[in-house]
């Protein structure tokens, strides 16, 4: 865990302030909000924050997906990895797929991610009994605030968040605007993006 | 070089009197030097360490950043031939092999004949064994999702099975004047160049533009070190290689406001 509050003094210095109390054109809360925006952008673009959710026990064909969800890598039911499928594929497989239930010792074989928008996943066929459902997914990390500034990222990426915050602060319209600094930082962040692609873009 | 020496050089590059700097504080310069070293290590993966990691029976997924705060990326994962129980992943490398109270041989554990784990995706594990999520035994493959979610193709059923994980790590921050950067001494001067380009951000304009030559030198040193580390990593069959910096186009990074027309001699500004 990296404590983002430790990065604040250096960030304030680059904003020509002696500390958070000395900030004129920005507030501490605003800096954390901008850091959160950069963190979410990092998470969204490259699926860098992954977790194996604690198994949930469910007999329902529909499972709600939490709001911080980004992408699913694996769905398993009772230890069996399910095959991902789209609604179109299941319609081609079984015209009555929405009503088909597990029968004759069979089991759930597929999960559907494009059924009822982005907030649900659905099993096919409809399960007969409850079972442990395991989701391995990419998600948004917890939002850093002044009171809880810990984020599970490698230390160099705390610098990435500080730079992105500085870029946004210097691009903001006002007397403290420095477009050339914002533009320079933007190019630095693109180098970080290349690093992300090289180290974490390979799929494992 | 020590932090104190690096800071003095940075002050000189910033046109400050090291004895009584006016526009920068010691803490600012120290933070910038630490940031430059962290980025150097991210670009080159030049710092690595190997630590034992005790597997929990029945557990397949492990978020490693919660265990090791200096984690960047896995380089090699192998099974430990140590069949004693009780060594847990400790933060301090010096005490990592300290005997724990319950450190004794586990009767069911034997050393694996194929200790190195192959990097794999979930799809590959599924392709090799459709029941991999329930497979037990000594793991043969591992994967890593996102920054740090390590997963294994088989879960241990006995306590005491340990992995030896070699990973690229970030450096320990310099705090005291006598602290030295962890990267090779030959690259210490590049840290000053990298730090000055960061410090000049608070001024912007011509001062920042003047620091771009130093940033260019810093990146050149990083590129050369990354190429050397890449060669070593290929020879060692590591699972991650440093970024090929020599292929990266730095021209936009090293030019301030490339959208503005270049200044011509004899033409007054404005």
Image (cartoon, grey):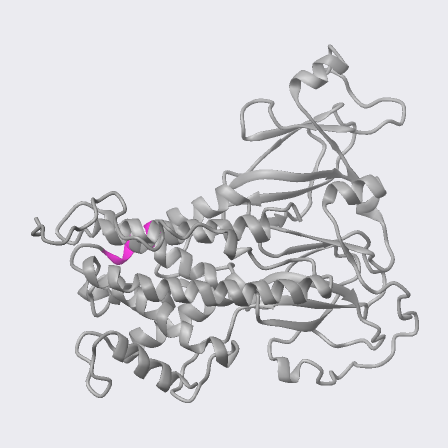
The dominant secondary structure in magenta is: helix
Task: Decide if residue B66 is in sight here.
Answer: no
- In the image, taking residue B25 as reference, residue B142 lies left or right, namely right
Q: Quadrant of residue B96?
A: bottom right
Going by the picture, which residue comes out furthest to the front?
B266
| B20 over A117 or under it: above or below | below
- In the image, taking residue A92 as reference, residue B219 lies left or right, namely left
Q: How many marks?
A: 0
Q: Position of residue A1 (x, y in %)?
A: 51, 64
Task: Decide if residue A94 is in sight here.
Answer: yes
Q: Residue at x 21, y 79 (%)?
A: B16
Task: Specify whether residue B79 is painted magenta.
Answer: no
For the record, the magenta segment spans A27-34
| A43 over B186 or under it: above or below | above
Q: Residue at x 90, y 70 (%)?
A: B109
Q: Position of residue B189 (x, y in %)?
A: 41, 77
Q: Residue at x 41, y 68 (%)?
A: B36
Q: Position of residue B179 (x, y in %)?
A: 44, 85
Q: Residue at x 58, y 38 (%)?
A: A71
Q: Which quarter of the rendering shows the N terminus of chain B?
A: bottom left
B70, B210: nearer the viewer: B210
Going by the picture, which residue comes out furthest to the top?
A95
Q: Position of residue B243 (x, y in %)?
A: 55, 56
């Amino acid at each position: 865990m990296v404590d983002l509050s430790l990065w604040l003094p250096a960030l304030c210095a680059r904003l020509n302030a002696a500390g958070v109390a000395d900030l004129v054109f920005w507030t501490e809360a605003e800096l954390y909000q901008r850091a959160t925006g950069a963190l979410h952008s990092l998470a969204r673009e490259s699926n860098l924050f992954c977790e194996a959710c604690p198994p949930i026990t469910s007999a329902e064909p529909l499972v709600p997906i939490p709001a911080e969800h980004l992408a699913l890598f694996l769905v398993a039911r009772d230890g069996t990895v399910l095959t991902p499928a789209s609604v179109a594929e299941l319609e081609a497989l079984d015209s009555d797929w929405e009503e088909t239930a597990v029968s004759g010792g069979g089991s759930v074989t597929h999960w559907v991610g494009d059924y009822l928008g982005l907030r649900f996943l659905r099993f096919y066929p409809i399960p007969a009994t409850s079972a442990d459902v395991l989701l391995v997914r990419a998600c948004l990390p917890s939002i850093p605030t002044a009171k809880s500034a810990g984020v599970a990222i490698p230390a160099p990426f705390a610098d990435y968040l500080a730079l992105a915050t500085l870029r946004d602060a210097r691009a903001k319209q006002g007397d403290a605007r420095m477009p050339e600094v914002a533009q320079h930082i933007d190019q630095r962040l693109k180098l970080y993006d290349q690093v992300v692609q090289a180290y974490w873009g390979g799929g494992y | 070089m020590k932090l104190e020496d690096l800071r003095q050089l940075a002050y000189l590059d910033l046109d400050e009197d090291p004895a009584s700097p006016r526009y920068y504080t010691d803490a600012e310069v120290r933070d910038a030097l630490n940031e430059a070293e962290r980025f150097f290590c991210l670009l080159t993966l030049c710092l690595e360490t190997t630590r034992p990691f005790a597997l929990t029976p029945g557990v397949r997924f492990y978020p490693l950043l919660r265990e090791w705060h200096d984690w960047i990326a896995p380089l090699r994962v192998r099974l430990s031939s140590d069949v004693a129980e009780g060594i847990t992943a400790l933060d301090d490398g010096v005490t990592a092999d300290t005997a724990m109270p319950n450190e004794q041989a586990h009767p069911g554990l034997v050393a694996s004949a194929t200790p190195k784990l192959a990097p794999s995706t979930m799809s590959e594990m599924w392709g090799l064994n459709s029941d991999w999520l329930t497979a037990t035994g000594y793991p043969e493959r591992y994967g890593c999702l996102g920054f740090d979610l390590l997963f294994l193709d088989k879960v241990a059923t006995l306590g005491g099975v340990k992995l030896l994980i070699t990973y690229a790590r970030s450096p320990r921050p310099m705090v005291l004047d006598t602290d030295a950067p962890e990267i090779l001494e030959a690259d210490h001067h590049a840290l000053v160049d990298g730090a000055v380009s960061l410090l000049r951000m608070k001024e912007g304009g011509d001062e920042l533009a003047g620091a771009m030559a130093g940033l260019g030198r810093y990146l050149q040193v990083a590129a050369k070190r990354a190429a050397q580390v890449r060669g070593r990593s290929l020879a060692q069959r590591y699972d991650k290689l440093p970024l090929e910096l020599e292929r990266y186009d730095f021209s936009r990074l090293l030019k301030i406001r490339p959208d503005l027309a270049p200044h011509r001699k004899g033409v007054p500004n404005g």
